[in-house]
Amino acid sequence: MTRHAKTSPGGTAGRHHGDWSVARRAHEAGITQVCSLAPTLRQRQVKELFSSLGVECNILELDQIDDGASVQEVLSEITSQRTVPNIFVNKVHMGGCDRTFQAHQSGLLQKLLQGDSAYDYDLIVIGGGSGGLACAQEAAILGKKVMVLDFVVPSPQGTSWGLGGTCVNVGCIPKKLMHQAALLGQALVDSRKFGWEYNQQVKHNWETMTEAIQNHIGSLNWGYRLSLREKAVAYVNSYGEFVEHHKIKATNRKGQETCYTAAKFVIATGERPRYLGIQGDKEYCITSDDLFSLPYCPGKTLVVGASYVALECAGFLAGVGLDVTVMVRSILLRGFDQEMAEKVGSYMEQHGVKFLRKFVPVMVQQLEKGSPGKLKVVAKSTEGPETIEGVYNTVLLAIGRDSCTKKIGLEKIGVKINEKSGKVPVNDVEQTNVPYVYAIGDVLEGKLELTPVAIQAGKLLARRLFGGRLEKCDYINVPTTVFTPLEYGCCGLSEEKAIEVYKKENLEVYHTLFWPLEWTVAGRDNNTCYAKIICNKFDNDRVIGFHILGPNAGEVTQGFAAAMKCGLTKQLLDDTIGIHPTCGVHNVGNHKVLGTGHHAGRLLRLVPLLLAFLVLFPFLSSRLRGGESVLMAPALWCRHSAGLSLTEGDQPVDEETGQQRASAQQAPDWQRQLHCFLDVVARNPITRGAKTDALPSQN
């Protein structure tokens, strides 16, 4: 039987249809070698290799076809390879000469030459999380024979779960539901101010909450299994481990082993929580793997870590009435905007969560057994020899996660991983260094660890492999939200990263404090919610970072993320009419936002006010006793006394009548200057590096 081989190059969307058809035929044929008219020695060696194997090699010489350069671009889009020869074997992109010879030496080339019919499946996905399931189902829709291998290794505390991965079982879904439970507790407190009267004691029942949440998760697990069955995807609840090229061993809970083969594999194994490696951590501590199905209330809890997982868990535990302490080694929310991170921490601290900064646990000892029991934690300072001790009912570790890639036999087939992190390096089409093995989701090196990202990458990968599509996953400007008690939503760059990439002098940062209408009657903090946008001054003030701290931050951020994908600029924000009264309105053109640069210098005029205030404090304090209106004056006074224009639109509006309130300029001059000073100190724009002028709270 004559076998065929092919090679080809890649391109961009807008190419002539003829270019695409030539490239597509090269991609879909058996074995092709794309090369120049005058083949090099290495190209001839590849041809000789195929001849020695009895394989007919179809050669596409770019110099001999019309628009060869365009075809080269089209194929480079498919393969991410711009050099020749570019070799495909039975629709699998091999690469160039070196990778072809390496595949021959390892036996991979011979496997590929056998063709897809020699395998049990077209695709085997290792991992039944969000990304893996999305990829498997999409491939099945495209007519391929697909298997999903999924097995949850129990946590040290014995916790395991069903199909669906981390997000569904021990991540996003139960986290958001417990966050909602905490928000309802706050709503109960607020409700009295809105006229709700109740005399009975209101308390939270942990067991009722966890049972309801686990019932919901169980329904999702069943839904995933049903969906796989409807699409004829084989689901095997076994642990997958490569044993040789194109062959994987599946081991079930009883230790029974079965081997399967496939033409292509996708690694979607995700991550699991990291432990400290100290005495007592795996014996007595829990992680997010265990918390959401914990059969008893955790009681007084120490949360170790400052990741979003740590702060989210600490937030909802405190929100349901527990005594919570967070032990922080260095900074909060590493990788996020640090101004926003500190505001998140400050709000949590003001609402009952205690923080132990610059300490790490060195030992966990059990004092009493129970549900919960009592644990003694010994911690050491990261800045000196100081040690502290504390007694808690539960210790929750949230110090990071490790990729599940080191025990699945990747070394047996030559897939490279980062030995330290376990992450898998891939190219821009999620392909590993072994051509028939791909990876998606949290295991990818340098990519975002978010469920929607994994789902999108999985679907697009299946469409490229089996549907003739070319779209790649876009990992830029992906929105996310941290579901702390006061939610933090963001999209794009943090301020620190923006400065690193674009330099500080090329940026304009706009920010505002705001007071949600729902908080006013309830008497909640009026200078806590905060929004910030970061713009590139030399790219038409394009928005490169969006950050908001407030209620429903995720809902607000999602819409702005779509706008950022479309090239959102500051002017477009200013031109947008907001929805009143909402939190999102504070990010668009209803209110003038003053940027850095020519306005910031005027704030230096406020320095004399500080000196005057210190000298005249006794006199001013006696005047203040005469009325509280001084402290309630609009922050616009600050802008006026700093030399900024005060327009009619700047004057506050009464929401009941729709009429503008009395102008701030009517206040006595000494009151305007005093309040300006108080406002500037509160907003602290000077200590922010004179980044922006303060905005008034808009009620």
Image (cartoon, grey):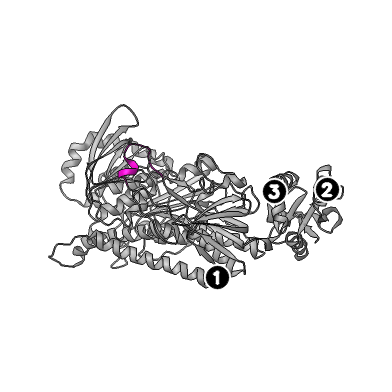
User: Which one is earlier in the sequence, the residue at label 2 or at label 1?
Assistant: 2
User: Which one is earlier in the sequence, the residue at label 1 or at label 3?
Assistant: 3
- Whether residue 503 sits left or right of residue 297 in the image: it is right
Q: Nearer the viewer, mark 2 or mark 3?
A: 3
308 vs 192, nearest the viewer: 308
Label 3 sits on a secondary structure element that is: loop
Three-letter amino acid code at the position of disc 2: Glu
506 vs 556, nearest the viewer: 556
Which residue is tagged 1? 232
In whole angstroms, how far apart are the C-alphas of marks 2 and 1? 42 Å
Tell me which segment is drawn in magenta: 274-285
Does residue 673 appear in this view? yes
What x and y, as percent, mark residue 526?
28, 54
Q: Nearer the viewer, mark 1 or mark 3?
A: 3
In whole angstroms, how far apart are the C-alphas of marks 1 and 3? 31 Å
Label 2 sits on a secondary structure element that is: helix
- Whether residue 506 sits left or right of residue 188 in the image: it is right
Q: Judge whether residue 348 is colored magenta.
A: no
Query: Which residue is depicted at the point 36% across and 66% down?
Result: 216
Per the rendering, the mark at residue 48 is: 2
User: Looking at the image, is 598 positioned above or below residue 516?
Assistant: above
Which image quadrant is residue 602 in?
A: top left
The quadrant the N terminus occupies is bottom right
Q: Residue furthest left?
A: 199
Which image quadrant is residue 14 in?
A: bottom right
User: Mark 1 packing: few (<14 Cα in 10 Å), some, or many (20+)?
Assistant: some
Which image quadrant is residue 165 in?
A: bottom left
Which residue is tagged 3? 107
What x and y, as percent, mark residue 258?
54, 58
What x and y, as percent, mark residue 618?
18, 37
User: Which one is earlier in the sequence, the residue at label 2 or at label 3?
Assistant: 2
Label 1 sits on a secondary structure element that is: loop
